[in-house]
Amino acid sequence: MRCHVLLPTLLLPLALAANAADDSLNERLARSAEAIQPKAVAWRHDIHQHPELGNQEQRTAALIAEHLRQLGMEVQTGVGTTGVVGLLKGGKPGPVVALRADMDALPVLEATGLPFASTVRQQYLGEERPVMHACGHDAHVAILMATAEVLAGVKEDLPGSVKFIFQPAEEGPSDYAYDGERHFGARQMVEAGVMKNPEVAAVFGLHVTASMPTGLIGYRSGPVMASSGDLHIRVHGKQTHGAQPWDGVDPIVTSAQIINGLQTVVSRQTNIMPAPAVVTIGTINGGTRHNIIPEEVVMTGTVRTFGDEVQQRVNERIERTAKGIAESAGAQAEVKIIDSYLTTTNNPELTERMVPTLRRAANDHVVVSPMVTGSEDFSFYANEAPGLFVFLGVTPMAQMGKAAPNHSPGFLVDDAALVTGVRALSMLASDYLLQTRPDH
């Protein structure tokens, strides 16, 4: 009993000294984040003006790789197509922590009016399309480039290593098709071994959002972002004259009935009390002429759920509903669901452990986020090692409720948020390494 009472007292001076050292390092990181803010803004503007679609991020990757090499890191390029990985070795032994940013843009025509707005066009699904950083990946890259420089400045004090992962194609490859063969960027990176050699003990990432005010950080323990399945339904009927529908099988009417039936998958066939689910049809194509009932109709959509078991049950009910309705009309339905993203789940223990770090990084501007039905392929990294994925607000308070959302032509990033992102990622990495060092 006496030993258990005395041990904390004997160790108290050591613990206080360690905490003081940790606080001192955090203060240095915070000052460095402030100092590098102008460079981070310049990088973001440059990347925003030169966006690149998934697996086409050659210019962006070259910019990143050169920066990491100048910082003295071991750098790998061409990982999972165009990915870049930098390894910063600390001055003391310890584990490896990974920080991730995505590099790709979207096929969106920019309408922001910014002086550095994109005028780029690239090939997307076989057509030349306008390209824009409409989801803030330019901010993600700039934040992680700045974080790399900040952490490189204190590497001798880091007990372990930091792996910087810049991945392509989070939004999907630019030649993506519904064949299940073209993987999204994180899966490519994981399959290329990015979480190994050296093995990653924990992984952190962030995503900017227009739905939160500038500098606010949102986090959630457990499931935070939905899994995503790409839904593809082909309805086969029998072509005939539009004036004589009884001589054929109408796939257009059948498709309309299938769309209505799919609404019951969530509203009547799925228990949504634990977590939400979404089934959406986004495209429907069929027919060539006003007076011809066509042979087939093709529909595509998306399925969003939280948790692998729920995802599997919803997928099964979609297939059963579509095929059953088609059969009742004398048609046939082929159903394919490609699970593109897993549910992004924050490790509860890691989340609880790092919340104080987030509070320091954001000056206590931290909230618990609701579940988000959007999806993120960060889930593939968090499936390999404990992960924590957080949201960073990028909308000035005066614009809250009026700002264009992510993925829209008018999406804007308030540059003032970048410094919070740099503080968050650099402190998450350093605090994790310091907390897991042998003498802690």
Image (tube, grey):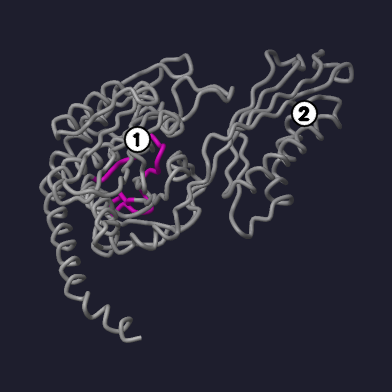
Identify the residue under disc 1. Answer: 197
Q: Is residue 282 above or below residue 427?
A: above
Quarter of the rendering occupied by the C terminus: bottom left
Tell me if residue 140 comes above or below residue 426 in the rendering.
Answer: above
Q: Quarter-wise, where is residue 3 in the image?
A: bottom left
Whole-number angstrom distance, CA of label 1 to CA of label 2: 55 Å
Dominant SS of magenta comes to loop
Location of the N terminus by quadrant is: bottom left
Asked where in the image residue 237 lies, by quadrant, the reply is: top right
Depth check: give the residue in front, 206 or 187. Answer: 187
Disc 2 target residue: 253
Type of amino acid under label 2: Val
**Residue 278, percent from left and from top:** 60, 45
Tell me: 47 left or right of 106. Answer: left
Q: Is residue 419 left or right of residue 131?
A: left
- Which residue sits at x=71%, y=38%? 318
Other-residue count near label 1 (Cα within 10 Å), few / some / many at <14 / 14–19 / ≥20:
few
In this picture, which residue range is highlighted in magenta? 392-414
Q: Residue at x 26, y 58 (%)?
A: 438
Q: Position of residue 279 (x, y in %)?
A: 63, 42
**Residue visible at 38% across and 38% down in the picture:** 195
Q: Residue at x 31, y 21 (%)?
A: 120
Q: Is residue 36 magenta?
A: no
Q: Which x, y percent locates residue 106? A: 40, 29
Observer-side mark, 1 or 2, equals 1
On the rendered structure, is 247 left or right of 167?
right
| SS at badge 2 | helix
Q: Position of residue 176 (x, y in %)?
A: 50, 23
| Magenta-drawn stretch contains 402 | yes
Q: Nearer the viewer, residue 212 or 369?
A: 369
